[in-house]
Image: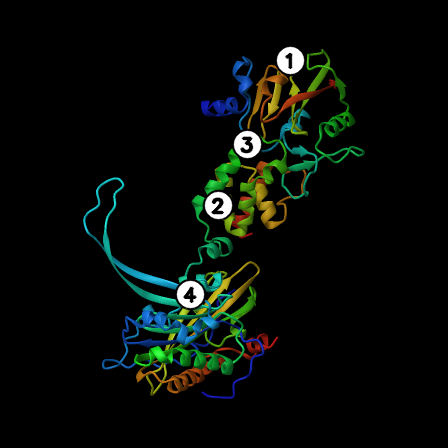
Amino acid sequence: MNLPLLRNGFKPLFLTIALGAGSAFEFAYNDPNIESSYNINESDPFIRDYFNGNSNSIFNEVTGIINKSEFDKLFNSWESETMFCSFSNQITGNANFKKIVSMGKYAVPFIQEKLEEKPSLIVWALNEIYEKKISNNKKTTIEEACRLWIKALNKGF
Amino acid sequence: MDQSIKQRILDQFPLLKDDLSFDVTSPATPNYNCISWAMKYSDRWTQYNSDSKMHDGIVYWWPDGVPQEPTIEAYKMAFQKIGYEGCGSPCHEDGFIKIALYENKGICSHASRELRNGLWTSKLGQNHDIQHSSPFTIEGQAYGRAVVFMKKKFE
Amino acid sequence: MEREWPLLSKPPIILDLFQIKFSEASSLPQDIANEESKIGVRKNYPNRHDNLNSNIQLDKFPDTGISTIKAKANTRLETLIYTSEDKKNKVAIDDKSFTISSEMEYKDWATFSSEIKKILEMFALVMKDIHIERISIRFVNRIRLNLKDDLTEYVNATVYVNQNNMPYPQYDISKFGFKIMYRIPNSPIYAIVNQNIDPQTDYCFYILDLDVLKPLDMSFNVDSIIGVADELRGIRNNIFFNNVTDKLIELCQQ
């Protein structure tokens, strides 16, 4: 979702500034006592998370705030488990590989970093995330494909 | 050669420990797999098409008439289509190039190729080529057993 | 600005809440527990969850290993939470607040208000001596939108960006939330409005959380309390219907 652009100046909200000294209230922005409190015991999970401000799983899965060390763990496990595998389905069917793909475009910067270190079959994760190949030329090797992906990503693929 | 690479290979293929001919003969490269290497290609990842044709650098090669399955029988048929015939052993025969197909858990897991000097060469996944004295010294948990040997006249 | 409010056939409310805050009445939860059968709350709220606070004094410091010790405990019932069978409706009481809430499908104000009145009348017996300091209602609305939707087609007040000071391309917003506090003119009433965008897989939730509160000074009287709740409802509706567009109201009619 894009932020709306401010074209003609701030749209006025119907906000009344609180009275100054002598006001009965001090508006403390984050003071929980100033709000209606709610006991989340046995609540619906969405409501519980909302009141707890606890949405780590949403952040990790959907909004892409992916921890690099989590990615590295998956990558290292994948590499070690598939290093001697002979067929692509063994490599792309690996659970760690699938988890990397499921991170979607949020994993791409980390994948790019790995390809910049050295060409790797993790480039196949880019094929699966973007659902396309970087080249339909049968003569394009995997190393060449890695270089083409890096170039394309740097240009803003 | 980084000794840790050799050690990792030896950990995975312990029979190589006693193979005096074992050596790592290329840098690691993801450009080709064992099937390509057995066919003497080093610029593509050749295999039976087990998933969608969406991965860069893979040549999905499967001759017409060969069952679409990763079994030893299917790979044997595939190599027959390109001029190989079955033979009883990996022993060197002048004028012929030989390959070995490995089976692990019911599927074809690897292929290695005889070199002109009688030693054998294998591409280990996305890693290095290695040289070994016979197809049997890379048998083990990773690739299973060498079960089919085939030969083709040198062109 | 007051106007005729549209009736929503599918109000997007996922939580409605009514709360009374009062000067400390530390024995209230225990008093309620003691009079539970007279109050009759368990008929519709059969489950009860207690939070206890206990001071435990040991007669002596325990020896290492397994030993038997005597202790004196001073335990107080701190919070009582009654819930309906399906856990969606709750009545929670502690030494400073009394809260009635529901996570069930919201019908209309009349239904909500009559349920509040019924429960207050049930508890009037025990709560008659409390001194009320604040009455509030809180409604959390949740509306499902597509990720590509333009939020300004649905709400009138949201976060804006100054186009002139943005040399870089717009980035996709993954999540945002902000809070506005309103002071209602010529009254002690204030409102806290939380807006959040909460993305899911291929859609997102827009949360509009309206909390309207009136600090006051009154004794416990059910009719007066309901009168205040009605007043807060008017303000809540003003804020809600002035904040949302016809397009969002249409979504709530489908």
- Residue C66 in view here: yes
Give, as a three-letter code, the residue at label 2.
Phe
Assess whether mark 1 and mark 2 are in contact (beta carbons under 8 angstroms): no
Tell if the residue under mark 3 belongs to the same chain as the one under mark 1. Answer: no
Mark nearest the camera among 3 and 1 is: 3
Amino acid at dot 4: Arg
Circle 3 sits on which residue?
A: A83
**Mark toward the viewer: 3 or 2:** 3
Colour scheme of the picture: rainbow
Question: Subunit of mark 1?
Answer: B
Q: Which circle's residue, 3 or 2, is located before the other in the chain?
A: 3
Q: Dot 4: what SS? A: strand
Residue C56, image x and y in percent?
24, 56
**Which residue is at the front of the view, C56 or C201?**
C56
Please tell me the numbered disc located at residue C120.
Answer: none
Left or right, C17 with respect to A93, comes to left
Q: Name the residue under label 1.
A: B118
Out of C103 and B49, give the one closest to the viewer.
C103
As helix, strand or loop, the secondary structure at mark 2 comes to helix
Q: Residue C48 carries which label?
A: 4
What is the three-letter code of the residue carrying label 3? Met
